[in-house]
Image (cartoon, grey):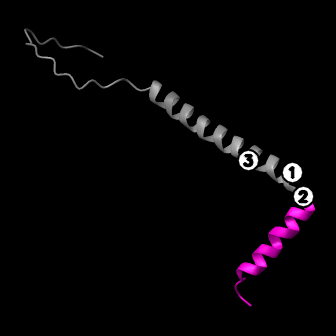
Amino acid sequence: MGTFSIWHWLIVLLIILLVFGTKKLRNMGADLGAAVKGFKQGMREGEADKDEGQPQISKQTIEGEVKEKTETKA
Protein backbone atom coordinates (compact mmCIF):
# COMPACT_ATOMS: atom_id res chain seq x y z
CA MET A 1 0.00 0.00 0.00
CA GLY A 2 3.05 2.28 0.25
CA THR A 3 3.72 2.60 -3.51
CA PHE A 4 1.41 2.93 -6.46
CA SER A 5 1.63 0.69 -9.51
CA ILE A 6 1.63 1.88 -13.10
CA TRP A 7 -2.11 1.16 -13.32
CA HIS A 8 -2.85 3.60 -10.50
CA TRP A 9 -0.92 6.36 -12.30
CA LEU A 10 -2.66 5.63 -15.61
CA ILE A 11 -6.07 5.92 -13.95
CA VAL A 12 -5.06 9.21 -12.32
CA LEU A 13 -3.84 10.52 -15.70
CA LEU A 14 -7.12 9.47 -17.36
CA ILE A 15 -9.16 11.28 -14.69
CA ILE A 16 -7.04 14.43 -15.11
CA LEU A 17 -7.54 14.31 -18.89
CA LEU A 18 -11.29 13.93 -18.43
CA VAL A 19 -11.51 16.81 -15.95
CA PHE A 20 -9.28 19.36 -17.67
CA GLY A 21 -9.29 18.26 -21.31
CA THR A 22 -6.32 18.05 -23.63
CA LYS A 23 -6.51 21.65 -24.87
CA LYS A 24 -6.32 23.15 -21.39
CA LEU A 25 -3.45 20.83 -20.42
CA ARG A 26 -1.57 21.77 -23.60
CA ASN A 27 -2.01 25.48 -22.81
CA MET A 28 -0.82 24.98 -19.23
CA GLY A 29 2.25 23.12 -20.53
CA ALA A 30 3.05 25.92 -22.99
CA ASP A 31 2.66 28.54 -20.24
CA LEU A 32 4.94 26.57 -17.93
CA GLY A 33 7.56 26.22 -20.69
CA ALA A 34 7.45 29.97 -21.41
CA ALA A 35 7.85 30.74 -17.72
CA VAL A 36 10.91 28.48 -17.42
CA LYS A 37 12.41 30.01 -20.57
CA GLY A 38 11.87 33.54 -19.20
CA PHE A 39 13.43 32.55 -15.88
CA LYS A 40 16.56 31.18 -17.60
CA GLN A 41 16.86 34.32 -19.72
CA GLY A 42 16.57 36.51 -16.63
CA MET A 43 19.29 34.51 -14.88
CA ARG A 44 21.63 34.99 -17.88
CA GLU A 45 20.92 38.74 -17.94
CA GLY A 46 21.56 38.96 -14.19
CA GLU A 47 24.94 37.28 -14.59
CA ALA A 48 25.83 39.66 -17.45
CA ASP A 49 24.94 42.68 -15.28
CA LYS A 50 27.06 41.35 -12.43
CA ASP A 51 30.05 40.84 -14.71
CA GLU A 52 29.60 44.30 -16.21
CA GLY A 53 30.41 46.06 -12.92
CA GLN A 54 33.72 44.27 -12.43
CA PRO A 55 36.92 45.40 -14.16
CA GLN A 56 38.03 43.33 -17.11
CA ILE A 57 41.14 41.27 -16.49
CA SER A 58 43.47 40.98 -19.43
CA LYS A 59 45.80 38.04 -19.80
CA GLN A 60 48.30 40.20 -21.65
CA THR A 61 51.75 40.84 -20.19
CA ILE A 62 52.94 44.43 -20.35
CA GLU A 63 56.65 44.94 -20.00
CA GLY A 64 58.12 48.21 -18.79
CA GLU A 65 60.72 49.83 -16.61
CA VAL A 66 60.25 51.96 -13.52
CA LYS A 67 62.40 55.08 -13.75
CA GLU A 68 61.54 56.76 -10.47
CA LYS A 69 59.50 55.88 -7.43
CA THR A 70 57.36 58.65 -6.04
CA GLU A 71 55.59 58.65 -2.71
CA THR A 72 52.04 59.79 -2.46
CA LYS A 73 50.45 61.15 0.68
CA ALA A 74 46.92 60.05 1.33
Q: Residues within 10 Å of mark 1 (few under 14, many from 20)?
A: few
| Quadrant of the rendered image containing residue 33 | top right
Can you name the residue that lies furthest to the bottom here? Answer: 1
Residue 32: mark in rendering = 3
Name the side, left or right, on which 18 lies relative to 55: right
Cα–Cα span, label 1 and label 2: 6 Å
Q: Name the residue: 51% across, 34% down.
A: 47
Q: Residues within 10 Å of mark 2 (few under 14, many from 20)?
A: few
| Quadrant of the rendered image containing residue 44 | top right
Helix, strand or loop at label 3? It is helix
Q: Which residue is mark 1?
A: 24
**Disc 3 residue type?**
Leu
Name the side, left or right, on which 39 lies relative to 25: left
Helix, strand or loop at label 1? It is helix
Instruction: Based on the picture, tell me whether residue 8 belongs to the magenta stretch.
Output: yes
Can you name the residue that lies furthest to the top here? Answer: 67
Tell me the mark number nearer the camera, choosing from 1 and 3. 1
Residue 20: mark in rendering = 2
Cα–Cα span, label 3 and label 2: 16 Å
Magenta segment's dominant SS is: helix
Residue 73 point in image, percent of width and height: 26, 14
Cα–Cα span, label 1 and label 3: 12 Å
| Quadrant of the rendered image containing residue 60 | top left
Residue 15: mark in rendering = none
**Disc 1 residue type?**
Lys
**Disc 2 residue type?**
Phe
Tell me the mark number nearer the camera, choosing from 3 and 2. 2
Tell me the magenta residue range. 1-19
Q: Quadrant of the N terminus?
A: bottom right
